[in-house]
Image: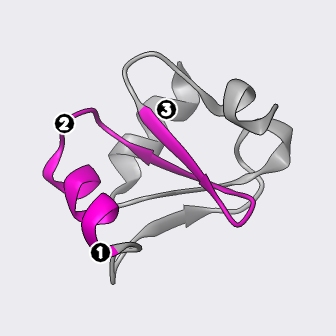
Amino acid sequence: MQEYVAAKDGFVTIIEDGRIWVFLPNSDELKEFEEIGEPAKCVTRPGAGPLQMTVKSVDASTIDAYLSN
């Protein structure tokens, strides 16, 4: 159910440890995440996502766009 609620057109969402990782499709950051895991630097918005889940991404603009849709 979490995957369904977190999904949004124009974004790739990955649920990990109860948190939503948000990436732009085909981005270098997504490829890096899939290859090596969590980036050294990220932006976190606790409780900002659906079901009050924490939202994480490599930059604030991606999170802002995801939350505004």
Q: Quadrant of residue 49?
A: top right
Disc 1 residue crowd, few under 14, some 14–19, many 20+, Cα 10 Å: few
Of discs 1 and 2, which sits in the foreground? Answer: 1
Q: Which residue is mark 1?
A: 36
Neighbourhood count class around disc 2 (C-alpha, 10 Å): few under 14, some 14–19, many 20 upward = few
Q: Is residue 26 left or right of residue 52?
A: left
- For image coordinates 39% across by 53% down, the residue present is 60
Q: Disc 1 on helix, strand or loop?
A: helix
**Which colour style is shown?**
one colour
**What residue does disc 2 label?**
26
**Residue 60 drawn above or below residue 62:** below
Residue 12 spot, x, y in % from top left: 41, 35
Amino acid type, mark 3: Tyr
Q: Quadrant of residue 39?
A: bottom left
Q: Which residue is mark 3?
A: 66
Where residue 20 appears, x then y in whole percent?
61, 51
Which label's residue is closer to the chain start, 2 or 3? 2
Q: Position of residue 11 (x, y in %)?
A: 40, 29
Determine the residue positioned at 21% across, 54% down: 31
Is 28 contained in the magenta span? yes
Q: Amino acid at mark 1?
A: Ile
The secondary structure type at the circle numbered 2 is loop
Residue at 70% across, 67% down: 17
Q: Is residue 64 magenta?
A: no
Cα–Cα gap, marks 1 and 2: 16 Å
Report how far apart the C-alphas of labels 2 and 3 lie in the structure.
16 Å
Q: Earlier in the sequence, mark 1 or mark 2?
A: 2
Which mark lies nearer to you, 3 or 1?
1
Quadrant of the drawing holding the N terminus: top right
Please, what is the three-letter code of the amino acid marked with disc 2?
Asn
